[in-house]
Image: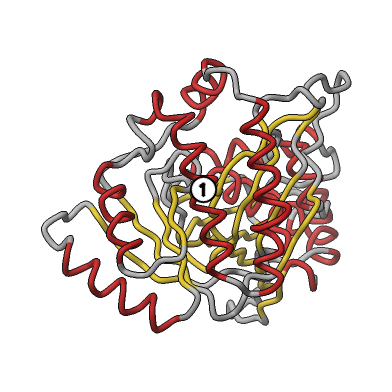
Amino acid sequence: MNSQAEHERGSRQSRSPRALSVTAPGRLHIGFLDLNGSLGRRFGSIGVAVERPVTRLRIETADALSAEGPDAARVVATIETLARAVPEFDPRLKVTVEEALPAHAGLGSGTQLALAVGVGASRVGGAPMTPHEVSRAIGRGMRSAIGLGAFEGGGVLLDGGQPVAPEPGDHRPPPLISRVAVPENWRFILIFDEGMSGLSGGEETRAMGRLPVFPEALADRLCRLTLMTLMPAVSLGDAVAFGRAASEIQRRLGDHFSQFQGGRFTSPDVSDALSVSEAEGATGVGQSSWGPTGFAIFGDPASAEAAVARLRARFADRTNLRFDVVRGNNHGAVLTELSDAEAGQGRSLQET
């Protein structure tokens, strides 16, 4: 390495961490509020950040850009995009993806990976960026800000959608208009179908463009359910009211999307498990985004653990199904600065 490169590397290391670990939470996307757009905005999303599964990666200074692990090519592409957008960013980094959210499962894997890479790499690379800045630079979160909100601080999230006719060049994510902590006692049974994938990328975009007209009366109902039932229920810790509202939102949206996902829910096996979950005491059930991952809501840990034990026994012959009981995530992504011995103190994104 020549002396100029050594000087640049020394300067970068003097102002930036040499290595970071980034852990980003998965999220449940409960649904869109308004696909009609007659009031000038459309979409609007409801979501919940969950403690697991997660995306976890390590970013270190290096002599050249490289990546290994799940979605390594996407990691490299994200860093190259940042390097083009931010001249002072040094992309000579090694990224190791140690754990990744399941792809195309409805848990926001692409957004969480991109934000984890972008925010972490910008800090190690000498040009720290906020999650919003990263999101704009790489074009993530344009339809929904739930993934961005989950990364920034977790909780139960509500965004205000996008203008139907945005100003030219306006690539801002939707505004986050509410974040309420997930009650500590609540639990979510996640139901994974490891034999199926939900729509994503171009397929998702084409499906969104071919949906039937979204009735204005349906948008009215979903907005009222969200504002007058679902969000107040979170604040009050009322899992029954929250689950009832979430289930109705899911039924109405699932029927609207049914022609592109084969029914109200993408996976028939997940659909069966959700029906059983309701009988087992879930206050609400649904599918995250395009699925196939389903979720069942419980107001206390004991009920959720008892229900998941019965589900595992009931569906033992369906080896494609996997169940987990998780808490909500109320802190968002965690960045841990690593020493040469790879030790450090984990901190939530909001505290760094």
Q: Which image quadrant for residue 173?
A: top right
Side of 141 where 211 appears, left or right: left
236 to the left or right of 260: right
Q: Position of residue 51 (x, y in %)?
A: 53, 69
The percent coordinates of residue 268 (x first, y second) are 26, 42
Relative to 50, say whether 251 is above or below: above
Coloring scheme used? secondary structure
Mark 1 sits on what residue? Answer: 248
Quarter that holds the C terminus: bottom right
Q: Looking at the image, which residue is at 17% across and 55% down?
A: 319
Which residue is nearer to you in this view: 286 or 113? 286
Q: Amino acid at mark 1?
A: Glu
- At 40% from the left and 37% from the top, the residue drawn is 198
Rendered position, 119 above or below 233: above
Q: Residues within 10 Å of mark 1 (few under 14, many from 20)?
A: some
The answer to whether one can see residue 58 in this image is no
Q: Percent x, y for residue 277?
A: 33, 62
Q: Secondary structure at mark 1?
A: helix
**Most extreme residue toward the right, as rendered?**
167
The structure residue drawn at horizontal position 54% and vertical position 80%, both measured from the top left corner, is: 185
Q: Is residue 200 above or below residue 304?
A: above
Residue at 60% over, 24% down: 214
Please say if 210 is above or below 134: above
Q: Position of residue 75 (x, y in %)?
A: 56, 43
Towards the viewer: 302 or 201 = 302
Q: Name the foreground residue: 4 vs 192.
A: 192
Q: How many marks?
A: 1
Q: Is residue 171 in sight in this rendering?
A: yes
